[in-house]
Image (cartoon, helix red, strand yellow):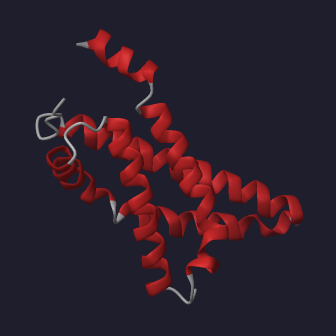
């Protein structure tokens, strides 16, 4: 089944911003709990990491519509959830690479402890945004 993302770009853009918000809020909350559980005064490190993650990932948001358009032509049989999961993994790796290139962090292994909570939160958000309950709600709305 071919999905025409050009006609649903508004919905895709809204879902992208919801995904961005949920992954950043979830990842920052995870880091906040992790850092503050060891030492309460370290909460500010998690908040700064959350701000950095939000800024880096916001730079990737404009690439979503072209990504879905390209993927609907390359892999027309894929579901939106599969495309979204592929996009999350691809953009997660891209954002991590940007952090390695543009920050004093020198390797992907050094970035992962801080970025993995955001990746997990993004995958969970995709499962929620593109899950069966959301499909039923969209079908009932139309």
Residue 91: % across, % down: 39, 61
**Quarter-wise, where is residue 46 in the image?**
bottom right
Quadrant location of the C terminus in the rendered image:
top left
- Above or below, 137 against 42 in this view is above
- Above or below, 119 against 114 in this view is above
- Above or below, 72 against 42 in this view is above
Q: Residue at x 43, y 50 (%)?
A: 20
Residue 96: % across, % down: 48, 72
Circle count: 0
**Quarter-wise, where is residue 83 in the image?**
top left
Whether residue 127 is visible: yes
Q: Nearer the viewer, residue 1 or 8?
A: 1
Q: Residue at x 45, y 77 (%)?
A: 97
- Give the side of residue 82 with respect to residue 70, left or right: right
Q: Residue at x 44, y 21 (%)?
A: 132
- Give the side of residue 129 with respect to residue 30, left or right: left
**Quarter-wise, where is residue 131 in the image?**
top left
Q: Residue furthest top?
A: 140
Residue 103: % across, % down: 51, 86
Q: Nearer the viewer, residue 41 or 114?
A: 114
Quadrant location of the N terminus in the rendered image:
top left
Q: Residue at x 17, y 52 (%)?
A: 70
- Give the side of residue 13 with respect to residue 100, left or right: left
- Above or below, 124 against 137 in this view is below
- Give the side of residue 23 with respect to residue 29, left or right: left
Residue 31: % across, % down: 70, 59
Whether residue 48 is visible: no
Q: Nearer the viewer, residue 121 or 84?
A: 84
């Amino acid at each position: 089944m071919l999905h025409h993302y050009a006609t649903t770009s508004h919905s895709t853009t809204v879902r992208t911003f919801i995904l961005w918000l949920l992954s950043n809020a979830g990842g920052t909350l995870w880091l906040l709990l992790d850092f503050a559980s060891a030492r309460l005064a370290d909460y500010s490190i998690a908040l700064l990491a959350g701000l950095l993650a939000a800024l880096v990932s916001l730079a990737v948001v404009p690439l979503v519509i072209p990504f879905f358009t390209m993927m609907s032509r390359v892999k027309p049989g894929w579901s939106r959830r599969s495309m979204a999961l592929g996009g999350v993994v691809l953009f997660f790796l891209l954002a991590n690479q940007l952090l390695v290139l543009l920050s004093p962090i020198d390797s992907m292994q050094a970035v992962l402890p801080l970025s993995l909570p955001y990746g997990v939160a993004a995958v969970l958000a995709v499962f929620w945004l593109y899950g069966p309950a959301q499909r039923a709600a969209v079908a009932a709305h139309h």
